[in-house]
Amino acid sequence: MLHKLKNYLGDASEDIHFSEPTKKNLVADDPIDIERRDKVKEAMLHAWTSYERYAWGQDELQVFRHNKYVPYFSCQPQTKNGIDSFGGLGATIVDSLDTLYIMGLDDQFQKAKEWVAKSLDFNKDYEASVFETTIRVAGGLLSAYDLSEDKVFLEKAKEIVDRLLPAWDSPSGIPYNRINLAHGNPHNPSWTGRNSILADSGTEQLEFIALSQRTGDSKYQQKAENVITQLQKTFPSDGLLPIYINPDTGGSSYSAITFGAMGDSFYEYLIKAWIQGNKTESVKHYREMWETSMQGLVSLVRKTTPSSFSYICEKNGDSLSHKMDELACFVPGMLALGSFGYDSENSEKFLSLAKELAWTCYNFYQSTPTKLAGENYYFHDGQDMNVGTSWNILRPETVESLMYLWRFTGNKTYQEWGWNIFQAFEKNSRIDSGYVGLKDVNTGVKDNTMQSFFLAETLKYLYLLFSPPSFISFDEWVFNTEAHPLRIVPRHHQRETIR
Ligand code: DMJ
């Protein structure tokens, strides 16, 4: 498989036994794309080497300043170190496995694999986030397995999901969002009023279904799919669910409706579970729920003045809040992906909304002095967009959407936008010892963390933005919310016991 992928990028004319639809999509590799892809690969190598040097085995790389009151400058004394933000699971290693593989960084992939085989230990007395552990660790391992076919990744994926599984033992089957990896004891934190969070509860379907398909054990799939069955029972007519769910009843608790933090990937997984299930009758309800939610999404879209940027409002009860998280910038990609299941009129309508929202998200970046987006934006009459929370933590959502839109439209403008964003990361976030986010996109003052999703998602999506669309094709792969591609098991290969 590795050989095939490498040959594929090196020589697009070689017969590598991809499926017929994939071959039809083959386009000649543009020399500018090759150059840009190499630059992104070099960025990945820099990020990886820095992590390897200073934080190997820990979750994420951090650069500590000795004087916290002085802004970061590269000449300042620093302590480069690691932080165990996910309980000490080597999150950056596991999150990076497939990116290394896809980019052909073979030596680095082999070293990461050895660490997974010999040192990855889940027996941690740590209150883990079920969501983060699933999307980063289980998702990363399953993707590495699908790409490399090395069984060690599947065994490890099973091991971590087995530790997470008691979280689903609530009266409704909606999972509790935290669990101690060594001792179990699933629970919800007090800051949610002991509610479960929508995105945290509805973003395990792809990983758990994939695990059931690959192990032949249906219990993972059953637990995750039951969540959707429960939510379906009280699904509102606009398909918009509040972010808090009561795990005792499975009903919604009064809270915000958003396509940003705490809501986002629930909607993403509805359409992706339909794709993962080969769009068959048994997964039709996912598509139907998603289409209902997209009607709800349309009802939240407004336009700025004076420049007519489309944006997605949040909703509290009956009132709209004119605020949008950068996190919601995954929506254009999701709409483009789902637009092709509609009739031609709706397909055009949703693709066009995707393009409008992508333009807004790109302008979240372009409108700041650093050309990097803030965490969220407010929209006031006559002022277009204003940064709210002004940090940037190397998030991927906008480049993710640009990759989808470029693949679906073939319009190279999306590649240009992605290239501009990449250059802004290079200019503002690259330091001698890796990459860091910004505390403020207006001043350029840096923070100290290299988030694992920068290697898992941001750099991978940029690399794919400059690769032929048939490389890790949407015909054969579906990306989890942490950008880990999972192979779509063809319908005739799915075991009868699973569905
Ligand atoms: C990632 O962990 C995932 O993309 C998740 O869905 C949202 N947050 C981060 C990236 O911003």
Image (spheres, helix red, strand yellow):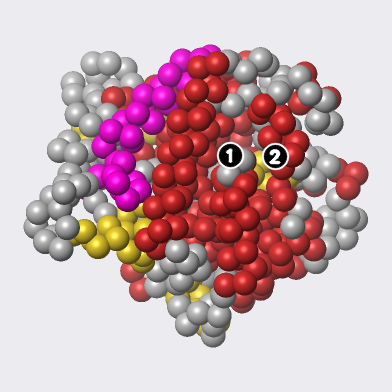
Q: Is 111 left or right of 445, judged from the image as shown?
A: right
Q: Residues within 10 Å of mark 1 (few under 14, many from 20)?
A: many
Local SS, label 1: loop
Viewer-nearest of discs 1 and 2 = 1
Residue position marked by numbered label 1 in the rendering: 103
The answer to whether residue 401 is visible is no
x, y percent for residue 236: 54, 47
Q: Earlier in the sequence, mark 1 or mark 2?
A: 1
Residue 490 visible in the snapshot = yes
Which residue is located at x 56 percent, y 52 percent?
Answer: 108
Span shown in magenta: 411-439
**For residue 225, which numbered disc appears in the image?**
none
Q: Nearer the viewer, residue 51 or 479?
A: 51
The quarter in which the C terminus is drawn is bottom right
Determine the CA span between mark 1 and mark 2.
16 Å
Location of residue 18 in the rendering, given as x and y in whole percent from the top left corner? 80, 31
What residue is drawn where x is 32% and y is 64%?
A: 81
Image quarter in which the N terminus is found: top right
Residue 474: in magenta span: no
* Type of amino acid at the residue the image marks with label 1: Met
In terms of depth relative to the viewer, which is nearer, 87 or 341? Answer: 87
Q: Which residue is mark 2?
A: 477
Can you tell which quarter of the image residue 151 is in? bottom right
Task: Tell me: residue 11, above or below residue 449.
Answer: above
Percent coordinates x, y for residue 417 in the rendering: 41, 22
Above or below — where is 4 with respect to 125? above
Q: Amino acid at mark 2?
A: Trp
